[in-house]
Amino acid sequence: MGAEYVRDVEPGEVIVVDKNGMRSSKPFSAPRRAFCIFEYIYFSRPDSRIFGDYVDKTRRRLGKQLAIEHPAESDIVIAVPDAANTAALGYAQRSKARFEIGLIRNHYVGRTFIQPSQGMRDFKVKIKFNPVGGVLQGRRVVVVEDSIVRGTTLRQLSRMIREAGAREVHVRVSSPPIRFPCFYGMDFQTMGEIIAAKQSVEEIRAHVGVDSLEYLSKEGMLSAVPNSAEDYCTACFDGEYPVEVEKEMTKLRLEG
Ligand code: SF4
């Protein structure tokens, strides 16, 4: 677009842009910052610059930290494309392993966890990814994924990767386990939908059918992002909601 980055909108601030130019006012009390840390993990494109840093650089740091915390004996490192690509590059770089393109994503299919029914999500995963047999056959594979919500995608992918001939499949996740619903707009709003709310890491590993499964620690995640920990919302990982959620709504969604 040729646009120029000026600055972020502050909490409580309203910016009006019209024929007279740009005006800023602060009609609301400015609460604490609470950047959605999931923007760095999954939502934003890697070429974005948000909360003071590039998403690409931050995601690489998440991947490097993951490699420090959870190394794996492997022949290759692959990503679940596209969101985990840069985290996988960071993981491979730090572990001095070979990065390969082991899965091809069909760009005409949307994001899977934002589909309304389980049946539709299952079907979409099948047409969304294709394994690259020549890369996976006979190899011990580390698969870097950005996050696990329901486990649907990963379960099907692990089967797909094995069927393509991989000898071992080790999953490394560049965020901590999602254990709580998001009430601020993300479509994983009930505890019933979130696999790590009810199952241990070992149970999830068995469910998705991989040889090993490890998540990045919360401390590791916070060490990889700019700003201080208090500037972020991390509620889906730790249940500490920065803006109070109405009790009735919480009850409804936690029971869901
Ligand atoms: S709970 Fe917070 S960190 Fe998690 S997705 Fe929602 S806004 Fe983002």
Image (cartoon, rainbow, N blue to C red):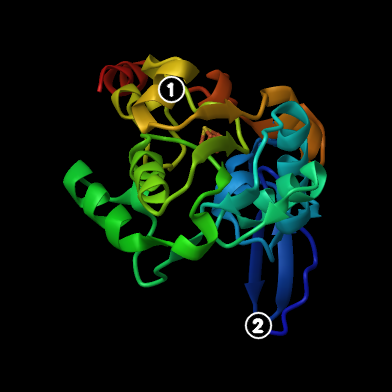
Q: Earlier in the sequence, mark 1 or mark 2?
A: 2
The image position of residue 159, as x and y in percent, is 35, 43
The image position of residue 111, as x and y in percent, is 39, 56
* Element type at mark 2: loop
Q: Residue at x 68, y 63 (%)?
A: 48
Q: Amino acid at mark 2?
A: Lys
Q: CA distance from mark 1 to mark 2?
A: 50 Å
Image quadrant assignment for residue 91: top right
Does residue 185 appear anywhere in the picture? yes
Q: Is residue 109 left or right of residue 161?
A: left
Image quadrant assignment for residue 197: top left
- Work out whether residue 103 or residue 138 is closer to the camera in this orientation and state it: 138
Indicate whether 89 appears above or below 224: below
* Element type at mark 1: helix
Q: Is residue 193 left or right of residue 102?
A: left
Q: Which residue is mark 2?
A: 19
How many labels sit on residues? 2
Outermost residue, front side: 138
Quadrant in which the C terminus appears: top left
Q: Is residue 101 left or right of residue 182?
A: right
Q: Which residue is mark 1?
A: 196
